[in-house]
């Protein structure tokens, strides 16, 4: 459905040229809403790894693709635009042979730099940073075996490409395919939050790597209004 919507809007833009006022390309503030399809790569989030210390254990999940939404704001210039957005998506997960649910949240700061500008659409490159936190239900346990939710926090970078289609003098649509390279650095569970570098594979296993690697691919479809 998101791809069909994108193709429909591009076809419409090819039939009708929208005149964008100079103010809309000269540092104008805009607000946007975003729909997102997010798919995690199964690197360290493989559904089988167990991390823990003497006080708590985390069952690292395998996260399935999910759909979400977001809101944001930014400024548009002649050469492109930048924006800050907050994105949320729901996911099914599996870990230790059990099914569960998770919520992915992130704050994303990105720029979209125009490579090609035409009368009907603009092609851009997408670069930025993201600050994610992933909450997984019933995904951690204390030393007594009591189950708790787990939260993983991290830092990542974005890269991708997309297109911007003007819909009216003050509205535009953008679609981006974004690759996110994210590392979860910190885990919170039943006890005090701890760095991933302080975790181990199992209660008696070897020390874990510096972070949990979690690449992801996102399709973002946004509708913006210039103030």
Image (cartoon, rainbow, N blue to C red):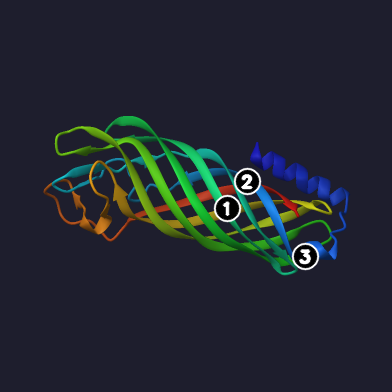
User: Would you name the residue on which mark 1 appears?
Assistant: 85
Q: Check the picture and name the quadrant holding the N terminus.
A: top right
Q: How many marks?
A: 3
Percent from the top left, x then y, of residue 45? 34, 46
At a point 21% along the width and 42% down the height, the residue shown is 57
Q: Is residue 76 above or below residue 16?
A: below
At a point 85% along the width and 61% down the height, the residue shown is 21
Q: Is residue 119 above or below residue 136?
A: below
Q: Residues within 10 Å of mark 3 (few under 14, many from 20)?
A: some
Q: Secondary structure at mark 1?
A: strand
Q: Nearer the viewer, mark 2 or mark 1?
A: 1
Q: Is residue 83 left or right of residue 129?
A: right
Q: CA distance from mark 3 to mark 2?
A: 21 Å
Q: Check the picture and name the quadrant holding the C terminus.
A: bottom right
| Residue furthest to the left | 204
> Image quarter for residue 62?
top left
Earlier-in-chain disc, 3 versus 1: 3
Q: Is residue 176 above or below residue 118?
A: above
Q: Is residue 19 left or right of residue 152?
A: right
User: Would you name the residue on which mark 2 appears?
Assistant: 34
Numbered circle sitting on residue 174: none
Q: Secondary structure at mark 2?
A: strand
Q: CA distance from mark 2 to mark 1?
A: 9 Å
Percent from the top left, x then y, of residue 139? 30, 37
Percent from the top left, x then y, of residue 51? 22, 47
Q: Residues within 10 Å of mark 2 (few under 14, many from 20)?
A: many
Earlier-in-chain disc, 2 versus 1: 2
Q: CA distance from mark 3 to mark 1?
A: 20 Å
Q: Is residue 186 left or right of residue 50?
A: right
At a point 55% along the width and 42% down the height, the residue shown is 37
Numbered circle sitting on residue 25: 3
Q: Are marks 2 and 1 in contact (CB under 8 Å)?
A: yes
């Amino acid at each position: 459905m998101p791809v069909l919507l994108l193709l429909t809007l591009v076809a419409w833009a090819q039939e009708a040229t929208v005149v964008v006022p100079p103010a809309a390309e000269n540092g104008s503030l805009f607000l946007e809403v975003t729909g997102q399809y997010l798919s995690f790569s199964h690197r360290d989030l493989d559904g089988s790894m167990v991390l823990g210390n003497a006080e708590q254990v985390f069952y690292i999940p395998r996260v399935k693709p999910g759909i979400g939404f977001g809101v944001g704001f930014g400024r548009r210039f002649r050469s492109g635009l930048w924006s800050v957005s907050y994105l949320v998506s729901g996911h099914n997960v599996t870990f230790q042979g059990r099914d569960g649910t998770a919520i992915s949240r992130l704050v994303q700061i990105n720029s979209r730099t125009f490579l090609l500008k035409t009368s009907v659409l603009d092609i851009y490159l997408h670069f930025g940073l993201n600050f994610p936190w992933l909450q997984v239900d019933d995904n951690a346990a204390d030393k007594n075996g009591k189950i708790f939710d787990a939260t993983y926090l991290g830092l990542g970078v974005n890269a991708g490409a997309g297109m911007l289609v003007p819909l009216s003098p003050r509205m535009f649509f953008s679609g981006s395919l974004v690759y996110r390279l994210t590392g979860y650095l910190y885990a919170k569970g039943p006890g005090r939050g701890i760095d991933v570098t302080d975790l181990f594979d199992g209660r008696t296993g070897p020390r874990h790597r510096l972070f949990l690697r979690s690449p992801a691919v996102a399709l973002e479809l946004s509708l913006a209004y210039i103030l």
